[in-house]
Amino acid sequence: MSLTAAFRQAIPRSSARVSHNLPRCSSSLHHFIFHSPPAPVHARTYASKHKAKSTANLIPGSKQALTSEPARLEYGKAEAKMGAAVEWYRKEVAALETRASGRVTPALLAPVRVELPGKDKEFVKLEEVATVGVRDGSTLIITVFEEHMLKAVEQGLYNAKLPSIVPQRQDSQTIKIPIPKPTVEARTALGVTAQRLAEDARVQIRKTQQSSVKKGKYEKHSVELDEFQKLTDRNVAEVDKILVQMKKATGTR
């Protein structure tokens, strides 16, 4: 109800008959009463005793940041795990791209892990027990620091199952690995491997999202669910981008 209507309703109808006997108000006051817009009504709100788990049901489609401290902590953990999955894939693809290009570098043996003799399933990187060099631009030369580690290094090379890697023992401390030029079939195989690893990374990213959402027990269409989905989409898109760049650089499909 407007102020004018409220004012008129408040005057008894009988008073209308004697209104001509009432003194007339000034024109400014008459204008203020009958022509001024109604004053805004400010409703007083009170804080809830219980903290809401999500504010998304109050503000649909909100782009606000996460408001819950547990949600922010879980988001940070998920972001770190997804980022680690992307970086792992980036390194794997870098090694595949090197092999596909035909460049011979020690990085070709980066995935190799060597089991230390006498230890309980303790594995170390190849460079921790040997040096890796390049001879004539097409051969890798591995020289172990200690002779008793030669057999463990050989086994580590076989266990890595790297394509076109066939170790040849030269002496008690040296292993030679000739690296053939990659064929079309070899590059295609590397492309297939890159696709498989990409799917592994995507699966890991989605598992991280599902785990975080399950812990939070967030409501449908909540801000939290939306933010975790955006985080997942960004990391999956980054994996896809790395794969596309690798295929473009190596000419694989």
Image (spheres, rainbow, N blue to C red):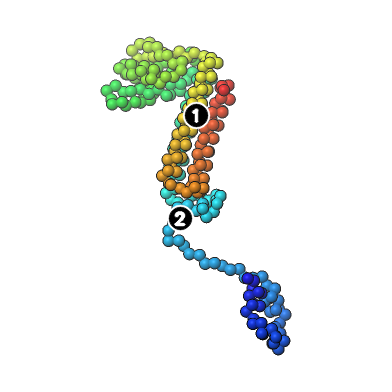
Q: Position of residue 249 (x, y in %)?
A: 57, 24
Is 109 or 2 nearer to us in this picture?
2
Is 135 or 200 nearer to us in this picture?
200
Q: Is residue 24 above or below residue 149?
A: below
* 218 on left or right of 243: left
How many marks on residues?
2
Q: Position of residue 192 (x, y in %)?
A: 51, 22
The extreme front residue here reads 14
Report if the CB atoms under discs 1 and 2 are less than 8 Å apart. no
Residue 98 in view (yes/no): no
Q: Residues within 10 Å of mark 1 (few under 14, many from 20)?
A: many
CA gap between label 1 and label 2 equals: 38 Å
Q: Tell me, for residue 52, which label it has, or none.
A: 2
The extreme bottom residue here reads 21
Which-is-in-front pick, marks 1 and 2? 2
Is 138 or 114 nearer to us in this picture?
114
Residue 198 in view (yes/no): yes
* Mark found first going from the N terminus, 1 or 2: 2
Question: Quadrant of the image for the N terminus?
Answer: bottom right
| Residue occupying the point 72% across, 80% down | 27
| Residue occupying the point 47% across, 20% down | 105
Name the kind of residue labelled 2 in the image: Ala
Label 1 sits on residue: 198
Q: Position of residue 49 (x, y in %)?
A: 43, 61
Name the kind of residue labelled 1 in the image: Ala
Q: Position of residue 229 (x, y in %)?
A: 51, 42
Is 233 or 247 nearer to us in this picture?
233
Q: Secondary structure at mark 2?
A: loop
The extreme top residue here reads 170
Q: Is residue 25 above or below residue 189?
A: below
| Residue occupying the point 33% across, 12% down | 172
